[in-house]
Amino acid sequence: MELTPAEALKRQAAERALEYVESGMVLGLGTGSTVAHFLDLLATKLSQGALSDIVGVPTSIWTGREARKAGIELIGLADRAKVDLTVDGADEVSPDLDLIKGMGGALLREKMVAQASHHVVIIADGSKAVERLGTLSPLPVEVVEWASGTHARFLEGLGAEVKTRWSDDVLPLRSDNGNLLLDCRFPEGIDDPAGLDAALQGRAGVVETGFFLGIADVAILASEDGIEVRERHA
Ligand code: 5RP
């Protein structure tokens, strides 16, 4: 099947991430269209016998379904103390490898799996690279439904335009955990991601934010000019 140029770039990033995968690994499997390429390429390697004895930890119901269809063996996060490597996508990647994630709605489980991982590799097309977080993507924030408007007002007070994510014209979208998602757009980008994250995490009713700060070890960014591999330096 002929890929669009954008899909071809996602696939290139996914292909490069396979270089980090070794037989016998417990592998965190992210969520999204870039990860879909990774699952497909991983399944091919497994069926060819080039990789073996791999078990995946899915970060969403969608990922679990897709991985199962591709014949990848799965376990739950609670079944193993540690995940060797997680491969996931992102909505924004900063020069310091800080991320915004969650436009696919899976931020909570993605962060739980990433935090349990020895190594986190992010795959994306180069359009996700930003100088300042918040300039391209809204910040998704997962909140319990009850009185979720209080968080929206708090965020609006900080200058954000806040929209509850809808699944269709009638119903708000629910995450795999049954919560709502607030998409928070900051017109000038986000000045202090760590400060905003701390302020949000301190609010009862906020379940998780789409900030992934200090979590990614490597970002593989594929663009027309080639593949850029960014690594976190300790
Ligand atoms: C899902 C995510 C995704 O990784 C992110 O939205 C990128 O998705 P895609 O690869 O489809 O652009 O964080 O919650």
Image: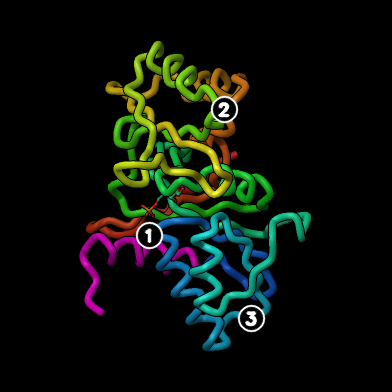
Separation of residues labelled 2 and 1 (CA atoms): 26 Å
The residue positioned 62% from the left and 59% from the top of the image is 85
Residue 16 is covered by the magenta coloring = yes
In the displayed structure, does residue 207 sit left or right of residue 191?
right
Q: What residue sits 24% from the left and 57% below the top?
A: 225
Q: Which residues are magenta?
A: 1-18
What residue is at 59 percent from the left and 60 percent from the top?
58
Residue identifier under label 1: 33
Q: Residue 223, percent across and down?
A: 27, 56
The quadrant of the rendering that contains the N terminus is: bottom left
Q: Quadrant of residue 27?
A: bottom right
Q: Which residue is mark 2?
A: 206
Q: Amino acid at mark 1?
A: Ser
- Mark 2 lies on a secondary structure that is strand
| Colour logic | rainbow
Q: Earlier in the sequence, mark 1 or mark 3?
A: 1
Residue at image mark 3: 52
Q: Main secondary structure of the magenta part?
A: helix
Give the class, few, some or many, for how many residues have Cα within 10 Å of label 2's Cα (few <14, many ≥20): some
Q: Amino acid at mark 2?
A: Val
Closer to the eye: label 2 or 3: 2
Label 1 neighbour load within 10 Å: few <14, some 14-19, many 20+: some
